Image (cartoon, grey):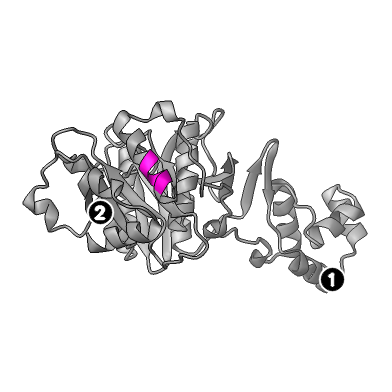
Amino acid sequence: MIEKIIQRIDGLLKKANYETLALGNFDTKKSKFCFDLLVKKDDLVFSIKIFHNIDSLNQDTIRDIKSLSLILKSKPLLIGIRNRYQKLEDNTIYVREGLPFITLNTFENILNDKYPYILARRGGGVVFLDGALMKTLRENCSITRKELSEVLGVTKRTICSYENESMRPSDKTAERILEILNNDDLFKKINIFGWTIKDNIEGKEVLEEQELSEFESHVQDIIKDIGLSSYWYKKGSIPFKLSLYSRSDKIKLDGFYPLFSGISEEQDKINEMSFHCLKMFTDLFNKTSLFIIDNDIKIPEPFKKINIPIVKIKNLEDVDDEEEFIELIQDS
């Protein structure tokens, strides 16, 4: 089911002239990434991930979805099929761990500029009303707050709260207000691409030292000595191993940081799949990247022609500071 949903979404996006990137050929059994599709159109970037049950979220996946969004300055567009109790409803945003989930139908509506207006909460959804418009419509209909409150079965103070938007009505109450005031613009649409993702990854080293391999630990020590901050993706849910950041306030290079890096996972050769995943990722989002390998690995000719710096560990060991590091990457 999930594979068919991804294919459906990919087709809708391409028809709407979006660029899409899928790693895993839509096969969720093979894809271990924290996204099923990465999507770009002009300056808009978002990641799509499908969940059968939004109440069975993996904490590592949540963390990587948030960090990926911050790295790419993108938004996650998360499609859910059901929660623990029932199927998800259309035109509704369900929030889990600070992340918004919607249905496939709601996603199709968004592509047609029809945004959801219900925010699901425990005990039922609440609707985003245009309070100022509600007040204008009520006054135009010569309905007092007291009269409207009696019809709805709420207090006069509640009506006032709806109109100044300090309180939001339930979906049932909102539908009743819509029947009375008769204006489809009364429901405010929630632009899911404006959703605020709260997480702080810069300077945060997620993994404990014991979680890194011997080679990765050596890379980490060099990175610290150079004066860079790092964020590792050990679980493999993002198609690169780590992101690098500057610790210096003096060095500001537009587009250079965060710097994505792959790591050689094999002793005798470059991991081809990892390398090409990194290339597709960086090509789509125009990000700087590099691939760090062991000294004994011979770089095949086809890899030399690809515009991703391949840096041997001995070259990193010779770097004394960040300025030399930047020169090494640019020269490579």
Where in the figure is residue 282, as x and y percent of width and height?
30, 56
- Helix, strand or loop at label 1? It is helix
Q: Is residue 84 left or right of residue 226?
A: right
Quick check: 98 above or below 165? above
Query: Toward the viewer: 192 or 132?
Result: 192
Which residue: 47% across, 47% down?
A: 67
Bounds of the magenta segment: 221-225
Residue tagged 1? 139
**Would you call the spot at circle 2 few (<14 residues within 10 Å), some (14-19), or many (20 or more)?**
some
Evaluate if marks 1 and 2 touch, with contact meaning CB atoms under 8 Å apart: no
Q: Quadrant of the C terminus?
A: bottom left
Where in the figure is residue 275, as x and y percent of width and height?
22, 46
Quick check: 29 above or below 46? above
Where in the figure is residue 191, as x and y percent of width and height?
56, 60
* Count of numbered labels shown in the rendering: 2
Which residue: 44% across, 50% down?
A: 227
Main secondary structure type of the part rendered in magenta: helix
- Helix, strand or loop at label 2? It is helix
Q: Is residue 209 left or right of residue 218?
A: right
**Residue at the far top in the pictured view:** 210
| Residue 280 badge | 2
Query: Toward the viewer: 243 or 192?
Result: 243
Query: Toward the viewer: 98 or 100?
Result: 98
Quick check: 234 above or below 318? above
Which residue: 23% across, 56% down?
A: 308
Q: Is residue 125 magenta?
A: no
Q: Amino acid at mark 2?
A: Met
